[in-house]
């Protein structure tokens, strides 16, 4: 196995030592971390993290949880993994609760729910769809519909990638905007500012949901993905990283979660025959750049340069992107690295 791929799996082991699962919040970043750990077990045929996931979900089931937005429904991903693996009803109950949320959530644009749902933030931020949601609910709804044969949810889920592209993918560049404000009938930011991690979510989500799409939707989604994958190729820095506003190279800062998510998508595209050799080389350069920056922190591997949770704020979006701080081991950044390592491993045929 490639030494840097192994390094990322070592990072996964270090991360579960660093964070007690009972201390993790019921939210999107932690949810993707748990889901990515589950994918490592699923794809490598191991059972290293099942107990860790159980402890998280059992804690929150006892404590109580709320599904009221894209972000707070994301933990349904790991719950569905446990439900299928163990057959235990308490995990199916979480997955079914998320399914009910998406069946009943008010639509704000076509058949798309408000990204912020009915949570507190929805009271102050305009009703909108966000590019993040393709990962937060696009993957889950396609997977759940496929798993249980739910035709109603399948119809909802299958159309989501095309809807995200319709409202968020720039017609000229093929890149994705952060959000779309439904009452204002426009993407936001208004100017051509493209957030790295947001485009990364699309790149990493498509490989995760592709196998669950109905046959008639796969070609369309592959076209959306390929257009974005090709549009991203001019934007890495010399060192292989993407910046947080990646179409203004040298003006913001290098950001590791976006870099790994985009690498994951490029690896997939190459393996699936959708992209050719230059994309595979760019993916390897990006992946190894992040791996070369891994640190030792308290005796455990640590991943730096992950930007904090990022919103497309009104009035000054570019300023907000620039001042959003970076840190080590944000959970969604770790998930990005795990997704990329798994796709790279598949390319190597191991």
Image (tube, rainbow, N blue to C red):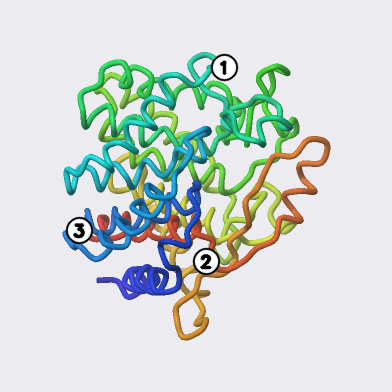
Residue holding disc 3: 349
Q: In the rendered structure, are the residues bearing label 3 and label 2 in contact, judged by CB atoms less than 8 Å apart?
A: no
User: Which residue is disc 2 drawn over?
Assistant: 329
Q: Residues within 10 Å of mark 1 (few under 14, many from 20)?
A: some
Q: Find residue 205 and report its horizontal and vertical position in percent.
A: 41, 41
Toward the bottom, the furthest residue is 299
Residue at screen point 47% across, 58% down: 24
Q: Residue drawn at (43%, 26%), measured in percent from left and top?
A: 101
Q: Secondary structure at mark 1?
A: strand
Q: Sequence order check: which comes first, mark 3 or mark 2?
A: 2
Residue situated in front as seen by the camera: 29 or 187: 29
Q: CA distance from mark 1 to mark 2?
A: 34 Å
Question: With respect to residue 68, does 296 lie above or below?
Answer: below
Query: Vertically, is 15 above or below 121?
Result: below
Mark 3: secondary structure? loop
Which residue lies under the disc numbered 1?
Answer: 109
């Amino acid at each position: 196995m490639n030494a840097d791929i192994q390094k990322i799996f070592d990072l996964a082991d270090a991360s579960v030592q660093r964070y007690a699962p009972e201390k993790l919040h019921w939210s999107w970043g932690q949810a993707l971390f748990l889901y990515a750990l589950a994918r490592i077990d699923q794809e490598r045929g191991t059972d290293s993290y099942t107990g860790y996931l159980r402890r998280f979900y059992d804690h929150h089931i006892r404590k109580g949880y709320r599904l009221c937005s894209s972000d707070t429904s994301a933990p349904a991903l790991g719950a569905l993994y446990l439900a299928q693996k163990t057959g235990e009803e308490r995990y199916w109950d979480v997955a079914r609760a998320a399914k009910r949320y998406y069946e009943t959530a008010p639509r704000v644009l076509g058949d798309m729910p408000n990204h912020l749902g009915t949570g507190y933030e929805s009271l102050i931020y305009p009703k909108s769809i966000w590019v993040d949601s393709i990962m937060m609910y696009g993957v889950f709804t396609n997977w759940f519909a496929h798993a249980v044969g739910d035709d109603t949810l399948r119809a909802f889920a299958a159309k989501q990638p095309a809807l995200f592209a319709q409202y968020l993918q720039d017609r000229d560049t093929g890149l994705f905007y952060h959000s779309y404000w439904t009452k204002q009938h426009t993407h936001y930011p208004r100017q051509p500012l493209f957030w790295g991690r947001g485009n990364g979510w699309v790149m990493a989500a498509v490989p995760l949901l592709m196998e669950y799409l109905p046959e008639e939707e796969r070609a369309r989604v592959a076209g959306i993905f390929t257009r974005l994958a090709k549009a991203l190729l001019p934007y890495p820095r010399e060192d292989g990283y993407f910046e947080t506003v990646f179409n203004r190279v040298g003006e913001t800062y290098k950001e590791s979660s976006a870099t790994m998510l985009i690498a994951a998508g490029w690896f997939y595209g190459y393996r699936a025959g959708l992209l050719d050799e230059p994309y595979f080389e760019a993916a390897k350069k990006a992946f190894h750049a992040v791996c070369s920056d891994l640190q030792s922190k308290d005796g455990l591997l640590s991943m730096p340069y992950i930007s904090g949770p990022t919103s497309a704020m009104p009035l000054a979006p570019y300023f907000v992107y620039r001042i959003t701080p970076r840190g080590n081991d944000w959970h969604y950044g770790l998930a990005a690295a795990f997704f990329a390592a798994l796709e790279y491993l598949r390319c190597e045929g191991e």
